[in-house]
Image (spheres, rainbow, N blue to C red):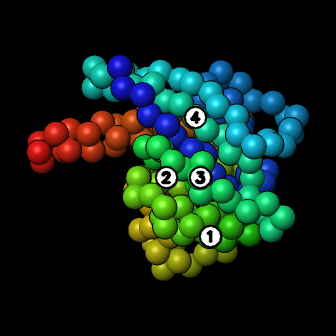
Amino acid sequence: MIQKKICLLGASSVGKTSLVKQFVEGIFSEKYLTTIGVKVDKKSLVVDDEEINFMLWDIEGSDRYNVFEERYLRGAAGYIIVVDQTRASSLIEGLDIHTLAKQVTSCPAVLAINKSDLPSTWHLSAIEQDAYQKLFDLQFTTSAKTGEHVDDMFLALAALLLKDKKNDITAE
C-alpha cells in the first residue's frame, strides 16, 4: 500500500473541512466549526488495482490575521487549494496561497472551486479562467454539500500521483 500526504489549503470558511468530511464519511453538516491548526483524516482508495492511503491534512484557513504556514507542506505528495465560488476574494487568497506553496514544493496542485450548489458571484473573463487553470495540475468544481465531484477530485489526484510514481520508476 502506498501512503500519501495531501494538504487542503485555502481561506477561512471555503469548505475544506466539509470536503474532507464528504469524502471520508459521506456526510455534510450545516454546522460551521473553524479548524484550528491541522486536523488529519485517512481514507484508502483503489486506483488501477493499486491501494493508496491518503492522509488528508485539513489545514486552518488563511486570511489576513492568520498567514499560511509553509511547514505544513513538508512531505506532501499533493495539495488542494479550495476556493468558494460565492466569494471572489477567496480565489485571490487561494492564488496567493498557491504562489507561496510553489515556493516550497513542486508537488501536484489541485484547484477545487467549492460550493457549486450555490450561485456563483465570480465575474471572470475566459482569459482569466484559462490563466488560472494553467496554474494547476487539476481543477474541479465541487459541492461538499451534495458531494458533486468530490470523489472524482480525490480519485483523479490519486491517479495522477500513481502515474507520476510510475514515470519516476521508468525514468530511473
In the picture, measured across the screen, residue 31 lies left or right of residue 110, that is right
Position of the C terminus, as image quadrant, is top left
The residue that label 2 is drawn on is 110
Identity of the amino acid at label 2?
Val
> In the image, what residue type sits under mark 1?
Asp
**Residue type, label 4:** Leu
Nearer the camera: disc 3 or disc 4 = 3
Question: Which numbered disc, 3 or 4, marks the residue that appears first in the sequence?
Answer: 4
Q: Is residue 105 left or right of residue 59?
A: left
Disc 3: CA contacts within 10 A as few (<14), some (14-19) or many (>=20)? few
Residue that mark 1 sits on: 96
Q: Earlier in the sequence, mark 2 or mark 1?
A: 1
**Residue at x 34%, y 41% (from the top left corner):** 161
In space, the residues marked 4 and 1 are separated at their CA atoms by 21 Å
Q: Which mark is residue 81?
A: none
Quadrant of the rendered structure where residue 163 is? top left
SS at badge 2: strand
Q: CA distance from mark 2 to mark 4?
A: 14 Å
Q: Residue at x 60, y 48 (%)?
A: 72
Mark with earlier residue (2, 4): 4
| Of 100 and 84, the residue lying toward us | 100
* Mark 2 → mark 1, Cα distance in angstroms: 14 Å
Measured in 3D between alpha carbons, the distance from the residue under mark 3 to the one under mark 2, in whole angstroms, is: 19 Å
Q: Residue 39's spot in the image, x, y percent? A: 70, 34
Residue type for callout 3:
Arg
In three-dimensional space, the C-alpha distance between marks 1 and 3, rounded to whole angstroms, equals 16 Å
Mark 3, residue position? 71
Q: Earlier in the sequence, mark 3 or mark 2?
A: 3
- Assign a secondary structure to mark 4: strand
